[in-house]
Image (cartoon, rainbow, N blue to C red):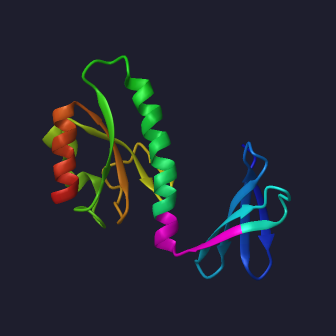
Amino acid sequence: MNVEITPLPGIGTRQDFTIRAGRRVGVITYRDGRFELILSKASDPDSCAASIPLSPEEANTLAGLLGAPQLVAHLREEHRDITGITTRQLPVTAFANRSLGETALRTRTGASVVAVVRSGNAHPSPGPDFLFENGDLAVVVGTAEGLDAAAEILHGG
């Protein structure tokens, strides 16, 4: 998919792309950290039909909702022929501002964190010193029991 990036002097940047229906969907990133989700008119892809202002936290949440499911679906497809192995995305609430190594997740559960989704961006193969942040989703691979145990650790410590 072709994403167009347009500098907006004194304002920020506009990043958008054309969807199958011919409309353009994009985001304006303001210099002060705000975001605006934009949608073009069906009759004129250069005219704005709707814009939704988003705080940085709202933009991060939306990015996570859009990015994490695709990554998990891809990993599930990769592991579908391996009996007993599952992939799940787990919210990290107990380890914000702490490292992956501090969880001792693999040692305690046998499950492995294969990626972390933050603000819609995947961070593949995080090392033990990877620092979690509020809103992170850990993409974890393991047995059903291991994933249940990992969820408890990442949620409750």
Relative to 148, 67 lies left or right? right
Q: Position of residue 115 (x, y in %)?
A: 40, 45
Establish if 78 lies above or below 52.
above
At 83% from the left and 58% from the top, the residue drawn is: 45
Tell me if I can see residue 136 in this picture.
yes
- Residue nearest the viewer, comparing 102 with 34: 34
Q: Position of residue 28 (x, y in %)?
A: 68, 69
Tell me if I can see residue 107 in this picture.
no
At 21% from the left and 57% from the top, the residue drawn is: 155
Establish if 79 lies above or below 72.
above
Relative to 123, 25 lies left or right? right
Is residue 58 one of those drawn in magenta? yes
* Total numbered labels: 0
**Residue at the front extreme?**
43
Magenta-tinted stretch: 50-60
Give the image quarter of residue 95.
Answer: bottom left
Q: Position of residue 66 (x, y in %)?
A: 51, 51
Is residue 30 one of those drawn in magenta? no
- Residue nearest the viewer, comparing 96 with 63: 63
- Residue nearest the viewer, comparing 31 with 56: 56
Q: Position of residue 30 (x, y in %)?
A: 66, 77
Q: Split into 4 quadrants, where in the image is the C terminus?
A: bottom left
At 32% from the left and 18% from the top, the residue drawn is: 82
Relative to 109, 12 lies left or right? right
At 84% from the left and 56% from the top, the residue drawn is: 43
Give the image quarter of residue 83.
Answer: top left
Relative to 11, 90 lies left or right? left
Q: Split into 4 quadrants, where in the image is the N terminus?
A: top right
